[in-house]
Amino acid sequence: MDDNLLIWINVDMVHFGLARYIQQKFNYKSSAIIDIQDVAKDFFLEQKLVAFEKTWYYRDIIKIKNKKPDIAYLENFEKKYKINLWEIVYSETIFFDDIRFHTFSYDEILSVIESECRLFEQILDEAKPSYFLTNAYASHSNHLLCKMCQRLGIKILMYTPIRLGYRAAITSHYDILDIFDTSPNSCASGISRSEVELQNYLDKYSIVKHNMEDAARFDKRITKFQQIKAILQFMKFSLSNKSYLEFYSNFGRTLPQIIKRQLKLSVRKYRRSSYVDKHFIRQLGSEKFVYFPLQVEPERVLSFGSPYYYNQLELLTLVAKALPIGYKLYVKEHPMMYTTVGRDVSFYKKINSLPNVFLVHTSIPPKEILKKSSIVATINGTAAMEAAFYGKPSIIFGDAGYSFLPSVHKVKNLDDLPKVIHTCLEQKVVLSTLNLLVDYLEQNSFEFDSRKLEADVAKWFFHGGYIGNVEILESDMNKFLESHATEFKKLANEHAKKIEQYKQSKLDNTV
């Protein structure tokens, strides 16, 4: 069988750059799904940088038609691919944003899903790919196609940052790195790092540091003048464009609605900032506590990795209820939530209403909290992994790539939560298991600053990420790809390496 590649290309453009360099060096045939807005689409219609066998323009095809969804077709689809379509639906934040441009009806949502199912069946039939190349579940549609590929035995090459900053991996399942032998033990290098060496290693690749740099990039990505220019560009290319407004994610994006939303967000941000400064703890005392770091919402690790444990307020309340007397629950907001839509103050007020729960200010370094905590509880956040480096066991509620650590306890039955907490409080972390984790991560990933590359794309083409519907010149794209040739060549080599690993192993990613 030929090595036919199906590549999902979206606004981050990483996979277009990958397609360019993988085609230059390796003898693969490539087809592409282009998920980009209509003005930017003109670049793909005319570009000569990459020769695709076939292309499908996702946003041209997925339209909500004024008809009832074909429920019989969707029922048969679920049986054929063993996919729970409502689970896919609930992973899409566009359908459930709490400050919405448009409230989607039952028929509208299922019409989108039906159109996607039919399109993806057509694509897989026509392209007949051996491998599907994508980033880590950028949307529900991407997630859906991955599940279809898994069912059909099409190998997935998912490019994703891992739990350590400045490293990335090519894997077949979100957040779980591929092991081409039998278990994580096969990754043991024989290196025995001390507790201090392990903590220094964690500091070197700190995901917290990476997140703080992401926040800084967000704040500095564009000047006020550039913001105004981006708004004018948006009004020129989008608000008067029928094709743009017909795509489901753009429903309701009229100028008055956009202004109304921005005003609501500004008010929310002001109220949140005021409440945080007045009611969040800024110093840790000597009391015993369990640490519950909140995760970003919306976030793929929650939507796709823990679809039935998504409600963080509900979970932290259950943890608080299960704590032994003498322990408090310290909850800390994720710093990236201050750069997004963010949570409403009512969310924090509900937390503060719990008698043994206290909100911790983000100015307190996570390392300091981890050192003083007794255990960590999180849905499936990186903090549970980092806790082990400071000798602290953890509790998780979803799947995570580090969960083979004996000090990480996954709660499978909520009735068992008090028992799991007691077990954790009595447990010690074994250094040898941490050494195994480091070996596992290193041998199945590579050094790569994925977030910086994506930020460079946003700054170069999309006004810092403020607007995606822009004209792209082939000459500009060529300059960008050449200026980042080192990164894209590395990505191409890593993908080719993964393909060879698949060929030489019996690893199966079907479900």
Image (tube, helix red, strand yellow):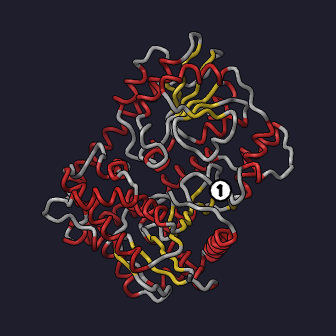
Image quadrant in which the N terminus is located: bottom right
- Viewer-side residue, 213 vs 390: 390
Say how many tags the image has.
Answer: 1
Tell me if residue 248 comes above or below residue 422 in the rendering. below
- Viewer-side residue, 12 vs 425: 425
Tell me if residue 418 comes above or below residue 437 in the rendering. above
Tell me if residue 15 comes above or below residue 198 in the rendering. below
The residue identified by callout 1 is: 166
Q: Can residue 249 be seen in this view?
A: no
In the picture, measured across the screen, residue 435 lies left or right of residue 167, that is right
Q: In which quarter of the image is residue 310?
A: top left
- x, y (%) of residue 26? 63, 83
Q: Can residue 30 be seen in this view?
A: yes
Dot 1 amino acid type: Tyr
- x, y (%) of residue 195? 81, 36
- Viewer-side residue, 345 vs 95: 95
- Viewer-side residue, 264 vs 427: 427
Residue at the location (42% across, 64% down)? 145
Residue at the location (53% across, 23% down)? 416
| Badge 1 density bin: few <14, some 14–19, many ≥20, Cα 10 Å | many
- x, y (%) of residue 509? 56, 60
User: Of all residues shown, which one is farthest toward the top?
Assistant: 325
In the picture, measured across the screen, residue 232 lies left or right of residue 445, that is left
Tell me if residue 139 comes above or below residue 37 in the rendering. above
Residue at the location (19% across, 59% down)? 69
Residue at the location (72% across, 52% down)? 440
Q: What element carries label 1?
A: loop
- x, y (%) of residue 469? 34, 70
User: Of all residues shown, which one is farthest toward the left?
Assistant: 66
